[in-house]
């Protein structure tokens, strides 16, 4: 099936060769269907002044009718041509809004029009009001809600094709919005008769591209891209004024300087590409006044079609431009010192540059970074933190810099960023008066506040700490204690004595709590209920075990409500996993007990199978390790077999899993894993593979964590492809794929051709295509169908104590 297909039959084959017509959607088993009907837990947004919580009602699963509305797939984006916003699958719609005063607990409901769907809520810098955009029948509108419950539309005709179409001005009384240009005509019609062929040509220059989806394909697509993505920036005042800024263009991103005087824009230009998404198109990054007068062009770069395939490869020249958060109007950007090629052997790969308004003095170099620049966390003239990362070694560096003394940097730490136990956390950021994020200093201004997950073998226990500006050991001020998992959301005073946390446990639904650090007092300020009480009786535990080579592994074991080992005996068990690559065996073997987490499945979660009598071994560690510069994937199959064997042995040893009734499953790279395990082991009676890729020759310029091309690592690509070994897969396998998959590399043709290979070799296989669904399935009907299919497959081939022969 091709990704563009609109009507695709569900293949419910009961034999290896029979094919039945498409059917209507199935309802999930009753317990699952009822759980899916419950509304999800609201989201929360804390105001910059930490006085108010915006409580945001989240829309439940959308109907398939919403996902089936006409969309356009252009330049890597999916848009709704009716509203000129992003397509249904790209937006988490909200449907209710209220404000809760953190001090008094008083709640004010915001009166919104019946049936309103809105997204991207954003507090004004002073915390007095909240802006968001809403979906109208024929477009998008900009709304502002006051803390007293009033709300109104302040602009209509927004252009949301690139994403969130507005930002606040620092004055909190106006916004800059990206709008559909006035007088825009009808979209360009498609020619009914071709006027010529489509030609692409290369002159011998290396131009590798990964397997991206939703790309431009012809001149009509280019015209549609121009029509729908071109927009006009407008300054919208809360006094109902509207002033255009500059000229219309393809403005992919924009931001206002902290002093409100300048505007930074990123404009796309022609020529476009049919092999790369829009973010690689020719780009102009420039500064203008807030009224649209041109001030400075930072870079006008060509199409970025010559990048190496390495993950740390980047464009030449200025990139990642932003405003320095703690200065009135200082432009900051990164530039590669290695020509964009991370394989170049030099001491420093990037430099970070600064240039202050009025941008007539030469830029200055803030720092050079040993690896690829990631971000800067700003504080003041005397302290900022620059972070870089290197993918190949999974290394992160943090450097202290003083913006008032550019060119001088000090290494604060070097670490493996996959190391959970050694994670020092991140500086706490707060919005300043301009609405920009800055680090929070201690009262003596000799340190910053830090928070982290606090991962240990016994569990994750988030913490609040201080770190001196000189670096070194942190001082813990507060650490969450069992049985709670309680991350810090915000500091409510300057001394870190009152904090806002989000507290949960294995039995308590997450809610927001005001905690007194020294006294230990805690006051809950929200009372969100359990969204799926049918799972309240489910038991969970973290189990640990070792791989054959000694690498310690772990998994979370879930058992159905009411299950008793002595009374009920071993259960049919589903192992659901997703492999991960590491460069250090010690890091790969880290175990973090999950016993203090509140787990309730949503969407297409495999955990719903607990209601159907299955044990679930969830997220068992499947590390693929390459130490000392070795390529992890060169021993992928061997390590995967060892990971799976260890997991199965461990859960069987506990007496809760029946070795003869084991199933394996996964989504995306987990589906790839599933097919490989069925091809290379006899551990499992059946498998479930959702939205996977199975033939790596179809992703020849890299995939997942593989940076080498097919031609550089042909044996690895071949051995890792379960398509190569389709004739060895004898256990029944269920293939499910979204008919409109939007994920790089997992085109629906991957499952289509895998099904044909399995069928041709006599396997027991069912192939289900979910019409109009992306990589992660969204519609209620598709969700219930997926869970029905998974249940039916396991009930048929795994639950019976004796194997079921194929018809």
Image (tube, helix red, strand yellow):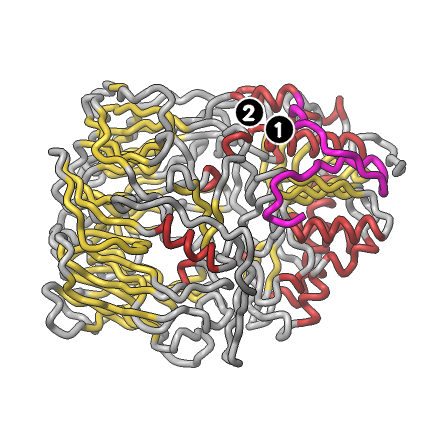
Q: Residue 105 appears in which quarter of the rendering? A: top left
Comparing 221 with 75, the one in front is 221
Q: Are marks 2 and 1 in contact (CB under 8 Å)?
A: yes
Q: Earlier in the sequence, mark 2 or mark 1?
A: 2
Q: Is residue 644 left or right of residue 286?
A: right
The answer to whether residue 197 is magenta is no
Relative image position of residue 644 (x, y in whole percent): 70, 50
Range shown magenta? 1-29
Q: Residue 294 appears in which quarter of the rendering? A: bottom left
Q: Quadrant of the C terminus?
A: top right
Label 2: how many Cα within 10 Å (few below 14, some 14–19, many 20+): many
Residue 601 can be seen in this image: no
Query: Is disc 1 placed on a helix, strand or loop?
Result: helix
- SS assignment for the magenta stretch, majority: loop
Relative image position of residue 433 (x, y in whole percent): 14, 44
Q: State how far apart marks 2 and 1 are (Cα).
A: 8 Å
Relative image position of residue 183 (x, y in whole percent): 27, 44
Residue lying at 31% horizontally and 21% vertically, measured from the top left: 113
Label 1: how many Cα within 10 Å (few below 14, some 14–19, many 20+): many
Question: Which residue, given by chain and number where applicable, does mark 2 sit on?
Answer: 36
Res 397 label: none
Q: Is residue 74 left or right of residue 270?
A: right
Question: Which residue, given by chain and number where applicable, does mark 1 sit on?
Answer: 784
Residue lying at 30% horizontally and 54% vertically, measured from the top left: 251
Report the mark closest to the observer, 2 or 1.
Answer: 1
Q: Is residue 238 left or right of residue 214?
A: left
Q: Residue 108 appears in which quarter of the rendering? A: top left
The answer to whether residue 23 is magenta is yes
Residue lying at 75% horizontally and 25% vertically, measured from the top left: 566
Total marks shown come to 2
In the displayed structure, 735 sits above or below 530; it is: below
């Amino acid at each position: 099936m091709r990704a563009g297909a609109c009507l695709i039959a569900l293949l419910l084959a009961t034999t290896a060769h029979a094919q039945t017509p498409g059917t209507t959607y199935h309802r999930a088993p009753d317990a699952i269907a009822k759980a899916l009907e419950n509304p999800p837990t609201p989201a929360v947004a804390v105001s910059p002044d930490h006085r108010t919580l915006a409580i945001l009602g989240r829309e439940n699963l959308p109907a398939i009718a919403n996902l089936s509305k006409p969309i356009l797939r252009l330049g890597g984006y999916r848009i709704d041509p009716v509203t000129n916003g992003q397509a249904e699958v790209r937006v988490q719609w909200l449907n209710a809004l209220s404000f809760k005063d953190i001090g008094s607990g008083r709640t004010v409901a915001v009166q919104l029009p019946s049936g309103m769907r809105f997204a991207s809520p954003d507090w004004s810098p002073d915390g007095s009001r909240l802006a968001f955009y809403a979906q109208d029948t024929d477009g998008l509108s900009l709304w502002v809600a006051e803390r007293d419950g009033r709300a109104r539309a302040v602009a209509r005709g927004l252009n949301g094709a690139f994403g969130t179409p507005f930002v606040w001005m620092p004055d909190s009384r106006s916004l800059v919005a990206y709008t559909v240009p006035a007088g825009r005509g009808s979209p360009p019609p498609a020619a009914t008769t071709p006027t010529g062929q489509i030609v692409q040509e290369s002159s011998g220059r290396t131009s590798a591209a990964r397997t991206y989806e939703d790309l431009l394909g012809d001149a009509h697509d280019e015209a549609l891209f121009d029509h729908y993505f071109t927009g006009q920036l407008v300054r919208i005042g809360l006094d109902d004024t509207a002033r255009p800024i500059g000229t219309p263009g393809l403005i992919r991103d924009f931001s206002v300087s902290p002093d409100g005087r300048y505007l930074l824009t990123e404009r796309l230009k022609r020529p476009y590409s049919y092999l790369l998404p829009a973010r690689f198109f020719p780009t102009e990054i420039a500064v203008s006044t807030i009224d649209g007068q041109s001030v400075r062009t930072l870079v006008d770069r060509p199409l970025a079609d010559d990048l190496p395939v390495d993950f740390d490869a980047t464009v030449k020249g200025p990139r990642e431009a932003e405003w320095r958060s703690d200065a009135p109007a200082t432009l900051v950007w990164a530039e590669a010192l290695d020509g964009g090629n991370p394989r170049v052997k030099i001491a420093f790969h990037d430099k970070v540059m600064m240039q202050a308004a009025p941008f007539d003095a030469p830029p200055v170099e803030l720092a050079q970074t040993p690896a690829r620049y990631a971000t800067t966390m700003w504080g003041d003239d005397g302290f900022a933190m620059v972070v870089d990362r290197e993918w190949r070694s999974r290394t992160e560096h943090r450097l202290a810099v003083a913006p008032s003394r550019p060119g001088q940097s000090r290494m604060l730490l070097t670490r493996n960023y996959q190391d959970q136990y050694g994670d020092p956390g991140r500086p706490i950021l707060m919005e300043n008066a301009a609405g920009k994020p800055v680090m929070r200093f201690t009262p003596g201004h000799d340190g910053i506040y830090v928070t982290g997950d606090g991962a240990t073998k016994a569990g994750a226990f988030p913490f609040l700490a201080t770190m001196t500006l000189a670096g070194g050991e942190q001082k813990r001020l507060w650490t969450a204690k069992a049985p709670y998992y309680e991350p810090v959301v915000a500091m409510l005073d300057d001394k870190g004595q009152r904090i806002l946390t989000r507290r949960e446990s294995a039995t308590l639904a997450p809610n927001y709590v005001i905690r007194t650090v020294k006294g230990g007092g805690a006051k809950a300020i929200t009372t969100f209920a359990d969204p799926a009480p049918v799972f309240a009786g489910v038991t969970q535990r973290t189990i640990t075990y070792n791989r054959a080579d000694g690498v310690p592994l772990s998994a979370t074991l879930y058992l159905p409500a009411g299950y008793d080992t002595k009374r009920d005996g071993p259960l049919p068990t589903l192992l659901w996993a997703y492999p991960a690559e590491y460069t250090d065996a010690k890091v790969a073997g880290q175990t973090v007990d999950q016993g203090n987490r509140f787990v309730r499945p949503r969407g297409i979660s495999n955990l719903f199978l607990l209601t159907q009598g299955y044990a679930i071994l969830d997220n068992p560690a499947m590390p693929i390790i390459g130490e000392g510069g070795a390529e992890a994937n060169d021993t992928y199959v061997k390590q995967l077999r060892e990971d799976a064997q260890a997991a199965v042995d461990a859960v069987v040893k506990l007496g809760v899993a029946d070795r003869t009734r084991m199933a394996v499953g996964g989504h995306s790279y987990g589906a790839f894993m599933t097919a490989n395990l069925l091809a290379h082991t006899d551990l499992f009676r059946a498998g479930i593979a959702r939205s996977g890729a199975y033939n790596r020759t179809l992703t020849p310029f890299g995939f997942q964590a593989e940076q080498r091309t097919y031609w550089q690592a042909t044996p690895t690509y071949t051995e890792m492809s379960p398509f190569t070994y389709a004739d060895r897969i004898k256990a029944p396998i269920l293939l499910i794929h979204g008919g409109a998959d939007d994920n790089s590399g997992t085109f629906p043709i991957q499952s289509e051709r895998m099904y044909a290979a399995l069928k041709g070799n006599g396997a027991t296989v069912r192939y289900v295509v979910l019409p109009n669904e992306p990589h992660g399935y969204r519609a209620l009907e598709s969700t219930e169908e997926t869970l029905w299919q998974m249940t039916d497959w396991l009930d048929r081939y795994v639950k019976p104590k004796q194997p079921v022969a194929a018809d």
